[in-house]
Image (cartoon, rainbow, N blue to C red):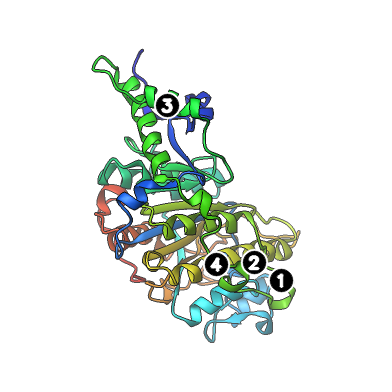
Amino acid sequence: MRDIDRRTFLTGSAAVGALGVLGGVTAVTVDQLMAHGRERPHIQGEGIVVVVTLYGGNDGINTVIPYANSAYHDARPELAYAESDVLHLDSDLGLNPALGGLHGLWGKGELAIVRGVGYPKPDRSHFRSMDIWQTASPDQPVNTGWMGRWLDSTGADPLRAVSVGSTLPTLAIGERSTAAALLPGAGAPPAASVTTLAALSRSDPTDSSAARLVCESYAAQQRAAATFGPVAGSGRATTDPDISRPTTPTKGVKAAKGSSLSEQLDLVARCIQAGAPTRMYSVSLGGFDTHADERGTQETLLAELDHALAGFVTTMADDPHGRDVVVMAYSEFGRRVHANASQGTDHGTSGPLFVAGAGVKGGFYGDEPSLTDLDNGDLKVTTDFRDVYAELLGTALGADPTPVVGSGRRPVGFL
């Protein structure tokens, strides 16, 4: 067999998905949680990072709202929120009325809001901008994500990072290592498949590098299957959602109970509570490309984010392993300052980023972008997202951020 590069292998081997390996990626199910967790559980005190990706470009101006700024109301006469509708953070800024749970975390000092986050020479394409955020490489396209490079630089265990869902995001792919894929709702593979995987995972001295990669993927799946085991029979490891998850009944906005993001974060919570040795998780929520009739759509999505994220942080605060968790929620770009003719907003540049958890130093970080001193109609970037990543890597995970995001990064200060 001729040698092939990792990306070709990852994208070209979907046929083995039925055996529990998605395109060469270690795949695990909820029915396979924690034999290895008992043997080598997460060490309390070691940080865990949960990355929440908001696909579509969330309107940061109507998320963290400059309600006291007349320029805000002038730019969005019908889309702007009145001061009485906003959940006040201080005398100038407030949260969208759908974010009651996060407002509660702010009051407890467990929510940091990093303002004006972006990167140099912003790109308004969804695909390119998300690629930049996930690869942490604004200057040139690369084939590895920042989570994948962290895996490459810190060891070979495939369970140190887990992506929830059947599609592996770019951020989870490294040159030599790739995050495991946790498949919600999938059952354990048949016994015959398990036997087949065991046979395929045995290496041979005559293997080419490509064949070794295949064997390593199958072997990794075997380790993952042994690790992600007992959670299946345990049911929901989190407490009743009506108790553990703050509700957000503000201004008639109903929390999206049982939403996809809530289900994803519930799986993550169960893994953490079971002592899984995973240090990074990836989950996502889409739909934020609000070019028309934005207000109602965004409120619904933010209510889903709020219900899932605030509930997850609250649940984790009561768990010995969960107290080590830091959650970061970001989107690929913000929106333009002025509303468009369809009562929506078009692709912009910088926006706010949320960091939450018991170990977070709550408050504002980064300068608030001006609504009048603009970059071609867009907010100027005041905080480089790679500085946020560097702090998560260096402080939460105890890793050298340089191999992942480059040198010269400056800590933001939220941990």
Q: Quarter of the image containing the C terminus?
A: bottom left
* Identity, as a three-letter code, of the amino acid under mark 4: Thr
For marks 2 and 3, give the CA distance: 42 Å
Rendered position, 73 above or below 139? below
Residue 113 position in % (x across, y down): 46, 71
Question: What is the quadrant of residue 77 in the picture?
Answer: bottom right
Q: Earlier in the sequence, mark 2 or mark 4?
A: 4
Residue 5 position in % (x across, y down): 36, 25
Is 341 situated left or right of 205 in this image? right
Q: Earlier in the sequence, mark 3 or mark 1?
A: 3
Q: Which residue is mark 2?
A: 303
* Identity, as a three-letter code, of the amino acid under mark 3: Leu
Question: What is the quadrant of residue 63 in the picture?
Answer: bottom right
For marks 3 and 4, give the CA distance: 36 Å
Q: Earlier in the sequence, mark 2 or mark 3?
A: 3
Is 67 situated left or right of 370 in this image? right
* Identity, as a three-letter code, of the amino acid under mark 2: Ala
Rendered position, 36 above or below 200? below
Q: Which residue is mark 4?
A: 239
| Local crowd size for mark 2, using a 10 Å CA cut-off: few (<14), some (14–19), many (≥20) | many
- Could you say which disc has been placed on residue 197 in the image? 3
Rendered position, 292 above or below 32? below
For marks 3 and 1, give the CA distance: 48 Å
Q: Nearer the observer, disc 2 or disc 3? A: 3
**Residue 54 visible (yes or no):** no
| Local crowd size for mark 4, using a 10 Å CA cut-off: few (<14), some (14–19), many (≥20) | few
* Identity, as a three-letter code, of the amino acid under mark 1: Val
Q: Which residue is mark 1?
A: 253
**Residue 286 visible (yes or no):** yes
Q: Quarter of the image containing the N terminus?
A: top left
Foreground residue, 143 or 20? 20
For marks 2 and 4, give the CA distance: 20 Å
